[in-house]
Amino acid sequence: MAREYAKGSRSGARKKPQAASRTPVQAPASPWRWYGTGVATGVFLSLLLYLGTLPAGTDPDPGAGAEVVATATAAAEKTPPKPRFDFYTMLPEQRIAVDVEPAQVATPRTEAVTQGETFLLQAGSFRQRADADRRRAELLLLGLEPRVEEASGEHGRFFRVYLGPFQTHAEMSRARGLTTAQNIDTLLMKRDRP
């Protein structure tokens, strides 16, 4: 129904709209409502799937599981028995009778290594004299007596750092231990005495 505004009624009374002529219009659904419905449906289906994968209980008595747990905890609370060490008493009582003569023990190698040979330690072989002098200085700081010798061969000239000659095996072992502690590799060499 259309109102006529051109003809104004001066009475001031307004006409009420008729409720029967209007149909209620619903607002369109919000996208958030659709999103929430999808999430809720997905959670519900996931829960059903999870419950379907659980193993079926074979024990119809739910109280029996509590008894098993109670016996397992009681067994765990018991302390294991202390170990017995019988060998402390058994070993002193045991004797072994042996009828063997003692063997002769060889004399240790603290004397001269051999009459016709001496031993040297080569602490490095360098192409440059400066590198050989640097290694010589390292060995001097260790309290050793190194020397540098020049050698020529088919591959060129080399400067070799030697320690020794050593008269006893103990001296050579002491020098080799000092160089090994400083990460200096040595080569044991045998030479005839002049």
Image (cartoon, helix red, strand yellow):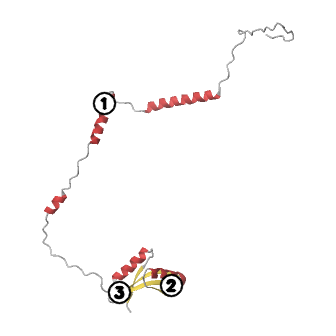
Q: Front-most of 65 and 103?
A: 65
Q: In the image, is 100 to the left or to the right of 112?
A: left
Q: Quadrant location of the C terminus?
A: bottom left
* Mark found first going from the N terminus, 2 or 1: 1
Disc 2: CA contacts within 10 A as few (<14), some (14-19) or many (>=20): many
User: Which mark is first along the chain, 1 or 3?
Assistant: 1
Q: Position of residue 130 (x, y in %)?
A: 54, 82
Of tags 3 and 2, the one toward the viewer is: 3
Q: Secondary structure at mark 2?
A: strand
Badge 2 amino acid: Phe
The mark tally for this picture is 3
Give me the C-alpha separation between circle 3 and circle 1.
85 Å
Which mark is drawn over residue 167? Answer: 3
Q: Residue at x 56, y 30 (%)?
A: 39
* Among the 4 quarters of the image, the one containing residue 1: top right
Give the residue pinned by disc 1: 64
Quadrant position of residue 23 = top right
- Badge 3 amino acid: Gln
From the viewer's perspective, tell me whether residue 84 is left or right of residue 4.
left
Tell me how far mark 3 sits from mark 2, CA to CA: 24 Å
Instruction: List the single residue furthest toward the right.
Output: 6
Residue at 39%, 78% in the rendered image: 176
Q: Is residue 128 visible?
A: no
Q: Which residue is mark 2?
A: 159
